[in-house]
Image (spheres, coloured by chain):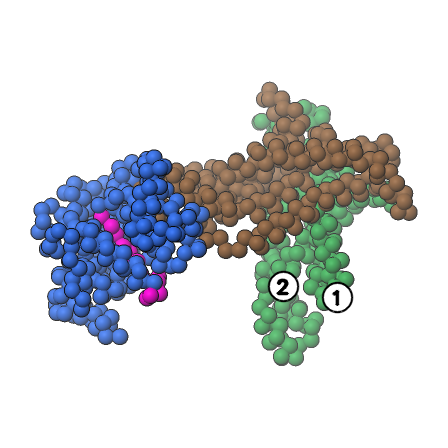
Chain colours: A blue, B brown, C green
Amino acid sequence: MPAAVVRAGNEPAQGGAKGAPLVRAEGLGVRFGELDALIDVDLEVGAGEVVAVIGPSGGGKSTFLRCLNLLEPPTAGRVYLDDELIVDADAQQFPIGRRLTALRRQVGMVFQSFNLFPHLTALENVTLAQIHALKRPEAEAAARGRELLARVGLSPQADKRPMHCSGGQQQRIAIARALALDPRLMLFDEPTSALDPELGIEVLDVMRELVRDGMTMVVVTHEMAFAAEAANRIVFMADGRVVESGPPERILREPQHVRTKRFLEAVLQR
Amino acid sequence: MVATLVDRWPEWLPELLDGLWTSIQLTAAFLAVGLPLGLALGVVLSSTRRPVRALAVLVVEAGRAVPVLVLLYLVYFGLPEADIRLGAFVSATAALGFSFAAYTSEVFRAGIAAVGKGQREAARALGLTNPQELRLVVLPQAIRIVIPPILGWAVIFFQATSLAFAIAVPELLSRAYTLGASSFRYLSVFLLAALLYASVSIPASLAIDYLDRRRGPLT
Amino acid sequence: MSEVPEYVVRLLDGVRFTLILTVGGFAIGAVLALPLAAARRSSSRVLRLAAIGYVETLRGVPPIAWLFLLYFGLAQVDIRLSSLTAGVIGLALIAAAYLAEIYRAGLRAVPHGQLEAARAVGLGSVRIYRHVIGPQAIVTVVPPAAAFLIGLLKDSALASLIGVPEVTGLALRLTQQEFDGLAIFTAAGIIYLALSVPLATFARWLGTRLSARLAFG
């Protein structure tokens, strides 16, 4: 296994050891009618930490991620951002309106199916939210946009529409789009699952760069190699619950739970 | 035999073309009213709030259940009782515009629904407000999707401008009728009028079909 | 506006004609559309083009113009049709054009494999259409045909302009006597609304019966 990615400046954070965690979920649950998609999930992510969430499909990973930026309102539990309570599902307190959009701007999300806006060019995709959500002047937004596109290696594609870009390029544009709002936390929902392995590599490289730059990230993924080298912590979720969590070396080499073992055996020994 | 059918066509043509121009003006007028109204109704029909949506359904169903001719009469003869006296052209614009909006609201609604859920999620994740999401992401795509069917309805309603004959708007059909009445050559003049309608409708429909095929996959 | 119910009653006399125009036009048109749809799918280029020409022309001209041509125009060449006859024929010709296209779409929707399987089993063309393709095509045809029937109901109002005393025609006459346009035409609107519901249901019922009958009758 490749060596763990060295972070700019600081050592890999141990869960919660560096002061107040950036985001904390307590007893988070999501229920759809009769189905419990998420049950009693507790998770903390410290500033600068990279958490990889792995597990079988339908295990609640995506649902959990989407609770963090409130694309999915939890039906139970609480979410804290910087120790401030932002969602209290038990007390039916959900942020709405301006508060909600302000919160969402602090959290960037990258989707499995990219979800780029097809009627806009790459640059326009990246500047749209800057101009309308952050009210940045166009010139500044465009400059920042080009800077970000350069950072993900796509300067030549700035004026192209998504349909003229490869899958890997589209996902990198999506990452640039999410970064444009200067979020404090980046959420990745299986960013490479819809890509050919070769195209997935370019996306993972960009993500490794982000890790190096100290971005706080929660990544739902099936890419075990990436999780092993880039994450500070791996969380294994199945059937809506957190089964185990810990440093990559321990989880991947010596999983404690039977469920974890079963999953890893299936994934690592295909 | 054919000669007697077409012999006065050159003589009648300027008058009928003038009437056709009135029909086209009326078309532009009702589109100016009906397109934004249809879009607005389509947006309301897509609302997640049931009472709001129910209201729009009511308006649309009423607009679609009633013959356009009755709507025309309703506006022209009915409104003066409420002391609203609109001229014939304006009455026709209002009636056709409302009817057009009622029929196309469903097309707009379908277009909005066709914009993928992922688009909306991405917009929300970026912190855009609901109105922004609608204006910047959903509508630009929805409108592109619905252009061919909307144009199709425009052609159908262009033909419906002939109903304005009933409230004395001097459009193509009423001119043809007047010419027919004075010359007793109804067959001849109505054939010419039909030809003129077809000369606009048929190429327009073909152009729309071509547009539809050329666009290909949108996203 | 409180007179609306009273006006509805007075307009009911016109419903008879509205229904004759609508159902008559639809029924005749539905039959005429069969050979038209067949011609549209024919291997003969002439037949195909003739069918396309008919459909496009019918649909490219306002329905009222066709009614005028039949009523006023034919009178010129000494073919004097009553306004009701002209109305029914006009609506039937229009219905044939639209229904032919609907039939075409319905036939296209039946998987080609059905035709091949039926041929493989040794069924002749007529039987194939009657027992295999027809019933399946009808399922696709019924919804748009029912919608068209409702559309034709509204087009029947046009016949008022050539003097048929159907609902709209009566409403206009009434307005010229009573000057209560708002209430009278609202009453007319209500009648059309009320008629469209049972018509739609009838159309769907007819479709189901027809499909079953064709398949097993």
Q: Residue at x 58, y 72 (%)?
A: C113
From this view, report whether residue B56 is shown above or below residue C22: above
Q: Quadrant of residue B188?
A: top right
- Residue C184 visible? The answer is no
- Residue at 62% across / 72% down in the picture? C115
Quick one: A122 or A85, which is closer to the camera? A122
Left or right, B42 with reference to B63 = left
| Image: magenta residue range | A185-198
Q: Residue at x 16, y 67 (%)?
A: A252
> Is B27 or A232 nearer to us in this picture?
A232
Which residue is identified by label 2?
Answer: C107
* Residue B44 drawn in magenta: no
Q: Please identify the quarter of the rendering in which residue B34 is found.
A: top right
| Numbered label attached to residue C18 | none
Residue sitting at x 21%, y 70%: A264
Q: Nearer the viewer, residue A222 or C185?
A: A222
